[in-house]
Amino acid sequence: MANLLVDSDILIDHLRGFRRFVRGKDAVHVSAITRAELFSGRASEERVIRRLLESMGDMPVDAAVAERAGRIRRTTAVRLPDALIAATAIEHRLVLLTRNARDFAGIKGLRIKSPG
């Protein structure tokens, strides 16, 4: 069992019917950034998105996450949303579940897992 932070790409693929997300026995969390990215899509999907996220722990962007994300941006080419997601995983000692590992390249201390 792992403590996971699920990246946006995993949930978007699930919502679009490309690849099903099955949480298994893992403790699953979602960043406030991922929540915002999901809600930036079609308004007609909001109820489905809310239902998908309701069983996941919410991870806010607090001062520690924001500061770490700023340091990640200063030392890597990672975009700000990805830096915030990575900082959330690092600060809360979560493993980032993503199919886009290269988007997070060079981030020291970040543990990444690709779905099976």
Image (cartoon, rainbow, N blue to C red):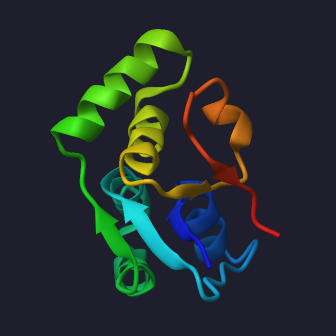
Q: Does 9 sit left or right of 47 as displayed? A: right
Q: Does 25 sit left or right of 28 as displayed? A: right
> Which residue occupies 36% across, 45% down?
91
User: In which quadrant of the rendered image does the C terminus lie?
Assistant: bottom right
Where residue 56 sits, quadrant-wise, is bottom left
Q: Does 96 sit left or right of 20 as displayed? A: left
Residue 6, given in percent of the width and then of the height, sits at 53, 63
> Which residue occupies 57% across, 68% down?
11
Q: Nearer the viewer, residue 101 or 12?
A: 101
The extreme right residue here reads: 116
> Which residue occupies 57% across, 28% down?
107
Residue 77, given in percent of the width and then of the height, sits at 56, 16
Q: Nearer the viewer, residue 46 or 88?
A: 88
Q: Nearer the viewer, residue 71 or 79?
A: 71
Q: Is residue 12 above or below residue 88?
A: below
Where residue 43 sits, quadrant-wise, is bottom left
Q: Is residue 63 above or below residue 44?
A: above
